[in-house]
Amino acid sequence: MGVMCLCVYENVVFSQPNAWLLHYDGLGRILQSRGPKPLKSQEEKQIWRVARYYILLSAGHQRKRCFLEQPQWASSHTIPPGETPDRFDLLLDLFSQFPGIIAEYDQLRQSSCIDVERSGAFRLRVQSLVHGLHSWCKDGSWILTIDPVLIESSQKHLPDDPMDCVSLAVCYAILLCLIQPCDCLNINIITGQENKESNSEDAASRITGLASEICRFSNQALRAGDAASLALLLIYPLQIAWYCLQVTAGDLTPVRQVLDSGIADSHGFELGRMRQWGEE
C-alpha cells in the first residue's frame, strides 16, 4: 500500500521526469512476488485494479514484456471468489498483451533478416488484440469508429457511467499505439477503413479521429463521478493522444485543455500537465 501511495504522490508532485516509472516498476516487482492469488475483498480488488494499470503503463512505456500477459494473471483468476470481472478488468486483460506486442515489434524491425514464421505468428497476435478491442467495445454497445457521420448519428450520446468513458479512452489509446505495427502488417485498425501505409494524410486522420474521441470521453468522465480518481486514470490516454498528435503536427489545443485544466489544475496531478518531451 505504501508503494501505491508513492505512485499517486509522484502523479501529484512530478518531482523528476522518470520518478513515476521507478515507483510503478517497484509496484510490479512487489505484486509479481505475491503471485496470482485470488483477491479476498472489494478493497483488494480496487487496489489491484489500479496497481495492474500502473504496471502495464510502466511496461508499455519501456516497451518491454510484462508478467501480467501470462494467463494465470487474468482477471478471472484473481478477482474475489464468486465475482465476475467488470468491463475495465476485461480491458486490462487485453491491455496486458500490448507491452509484449510493442517489444516484439521493435525486435522484428531491428532484425537483419525476416523470419517468416515468427512474423506470421506476430501478425496473428496483433490481429487478435485488435479484434479483442473491437469486440470489447461491441459488448458495451459501442462501435469503434472515427467516421464523423456515424459518430454524429449514432454515438453522439456518450455512456452515462463515467468509468465506461474512462475505459473507452484507454481502449482508444491502445489503438493509437498499435497504428504503426498495424500499418506495417497491413491490419485494419478501424473496421471498414483500409490502411494506406504510404498515405500520411490517412495515418494523420486516424490519429486525429482517435485522439478527438479520447478528449470527448475524458471531458464526459470528468463531469461526473469521483472525478479525482477518474482523472488519475485519464492521464495515460490523454498523454498518448498528445504525443501522437505532436508527431503528426495535429491540433494539440483540445488535449492541452483537458490535461492542463481538467487534470492538473482541477485535481493537482502535475504528471498530467502538458509538457514537451524531455521537459521537466
Image (cartoon, rainbow, N blue to C red):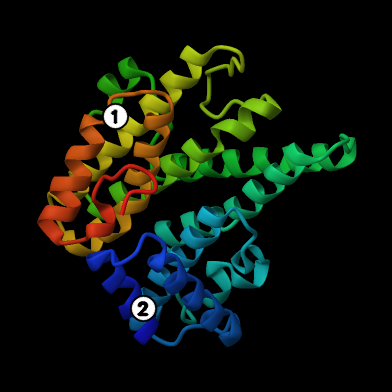
- Residue ID at (43%, 32%): 144
Pointer 2 local density, CA inside 10 Å: few below 14, some 14–19, many at least 20: some
Is residue 232 left or right of 133 when viewed as pictured?
left
x then y, percent, for residue 248: 42, 24
Q: Amino acid at mark 2?
A: Met
> Does label 2 or label 1 sit earlier along the sequence?
2
Nearest the eye: 180 or 230: 180
Work out how far the residue at label 2 is from the one at label 1, CA to CA, in angstroms: 36 Å
x then y, percent, for residue 264: 18, 54
The residue pinned by badge 2 equals: 4
Pointer 1 local density, CA inside 10 Å: few below 14, some 14–19, many at least 20: some
In the rendered structure, find residue 155 and report the number of the disc placed on it: 1
Q: Amino acid at mark 1?
A: Gln
Vertical side of 8 occupied by 105: above or below: above
Vertical side of 130 occupied by 67: above or below: below
x then y, percent, for residue 67: 63, 68
Q: Nearer the viewer, mark 2 or mark 1?
A: 2
